[in-house]
Amino acid sequence: MAQFQEMMRQQLESSMHTELEKLLDTTTGAEREVSRKDFEGFKNLFHRFLQVKGPSVEWLKIQRPPEESIQPYDRIEARGLPDNVADCLNKLVVVKLNGGLGTSMGCKGPKSLISVRNENTFLDLTVQQIEHLNKTYNTDVPLVLMNSFNTDEDTKKILQKYTHHRVKIHTFNQSRYPRINKESLLPVASSLNINGQSTEGWYPPGHGDIYASFYNSGLLDQLIQQGKEYIFVSNIDNLGATVDLHILRHLVSQPNGKRCEFVMEVTDKTRADVKGGTLIQYEGKLRLLEIAQVPKAHVDEFKSVSKFKIFNTNNLWISLSAIKRLQEQKAMNMEIIVNPKTLDGGQNVVQLETAVGAAIKSFDYALGINVPRSRFLPVKTTSDLLLVMSNLYSLDAGSLTMSPRREFPTTPHVKLGSSFTKVQEYLTRFESIPDMLELDHLTVSGDVTFGKNVSLKGTVIIIANHGDRIDIPAGSMLENKIVSGNLRILDH
C-alpha cells in the first residue's frame, strides 16, 4: 500500500513539474527567470503537501512555554531607553506586509491606500511614523514594502509622492504561485499572463513567503551590507505596530553569542481573539500553533482563554543574518496552510500557503514578548475603521494613541451590519463620526444613518428591520439605548 502511495505521489509531482515547465514556456526574459525562482519554492511546498499525513502536531506533546520564553513587556520597558537611540535605530529596517487588496472592505487596489484618518492612508501613516523617528534621532531607518503581484503596480505609482520625505523606501515582490485544481492537483492557469480572467490562476502564497522572496530579491544582502541587523515586520493594516525602542534595545543589547534571532509580540487573548495563533513549547522549541493545525476534537480547548492565554499579533523582530543563514541552509521550516477556494466559475481550487510567524521554531534564542493590547490595532472591517476614525484615538506623527479622556483602556466592541461593509457606503451613512469616548458596545443593523455630532455612550443597539430606515438626528445623545422601528428625518 505504502509503495502504491509513493508511486502516486511521484506521478503527481512529475505531472506538476511538466505543467510548470509548460507555463514557463509561455514567457521569456526576466519574467521567466522570476517565475522559475518562484516555482522552485512552489515545488518544495507541493512536495511537502503530498507527504503530509494528518495534523502537524501531536496534541499530547504540546506544553506551555517556559516562563522565561515569554517576557512581560513591563520587564523590557523597565530597562529604559538605550543610551544611544540613534545607534540602535540605524541597525533597524521596518518591513510592512503590503500584499493584500481592499476587496473585503469594498475597495479596489491595495488595502494600504485606503484612507483611515484625516485623509491619511495606512501607507501615509507608516511613512509619517518612520520619518518622525529619522528626524527626531537623525537616523536612517528605511521602509521596505513586501508587495504582491496584486498590489505592486498601484503601490509603486503612489510611492512617488514620498520622494521628498526623509525615508528611503524599497519594495520587493512576494512570489506568485499557481492555484491547483482540487481534483487533478494540477495548475488551473494556462499561461503566466495575469491580465483579466487569467489572474484567477495565481495567488500570493501567504506572508511566510517573506523569507525566500526577500532573500531572492537581493535586498536582504544589500541591507546587511549597509550595517542593518534586524527587521521589524508587521501587517500594514495594524495601526498599533509602531517601532518600539524598548524592544529594539532588548535585541541589540544582548551579548553576541546569545543574540535573540526572533521576537514575536503576543498579547492577552480576549473572547474576540479565540482564533488567533498561540505560542506553545513543542519538542523543546517555541512554536506557533494556528487553529488550522489543531485536530477537530481539540478546537474548543484551543479557543479557551484559560489554557492558551495569548495570541500572536504578527508584529515580529527578526535577525537579518539569521534569515540569510537559514535560507542558504534551506533550513526554514514552516507548516503548510491548505486554503481551499472556489473560483468565480465554480471551480474548486487549493492554495498552499505559509505564515511568517510559523518560522519561529527555526531560529535560535526565540522569544515572545507579551505587549499591551494597544500594539494590536488591526483594521479589517469598517467596524474597526469607525474606532480609529473616532475621538477614541488621537493622531501624532502617524501614530494613533488612545485618548487620555477615555476613562478605561479597553476599546469598545463595535458591530456594524452589512449596509456598512463597503467603505464608500459606510462613509455616506455618517455625516460626522460620533463621539464614542464613553461607548462600551455598539451594534447597528439595517438601513441606518447618523447625523452630525451624535454622541454614543454605554451600550447602544440600533436595528432597522427590512424595509425600515432609521436616521439618528444630528446632536442626539444615546446612552444605554435600543432603537428599533422606523425613524425618518426629512429636510423641511
Image (cartoon, grey):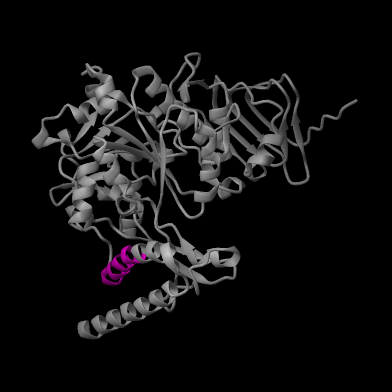
Q: Is 154 within the magenta?
A: no
Image quadrant for the C terminus? Answer: top right
Write down the quadrant of residue 311 in the picture. top left
Q: Residue at x 23, y 58 (%)?
A: 57
Give above or below for 319 relative to 21: above
Q: Quadrant of residue 238?
A: top left
Instruction: Identify the residue at horizontal 22%, vertical 48% (top origin).
Output: 324
On the question of residue 288 being in view, the answer is yes
x then y, percent, for residue 184: 42, 79
Q: Is residue 441 visible?
A: no
Q: Position of residue 372 (x, y in %)?
A: 35, 27
Give the prevailing secondary structure in the magenta stretch.
helix
Where is residue 320 drawn, in percent x and y?
A: 24, 42
Seen at 35% across and 56% down, the residue is 292
Nearest the eye: 58 or 30: 30
Residue occupying the point 51% across, 54% down: 150
Does residue 346 appear left or right of residue 178 in this picture?
right
**Magenta segment range?**
39-53
Is 93 situated above or below 1?
above
| Number of marks | 0
Q: Residue furthest front?
A: 29
Which residue is nearer to you in this view: 111 or 256?
A: 256
**Foreground of the two, 76 or 294:** 76
Q: Quadrant of the N terminus?
A: bottom left
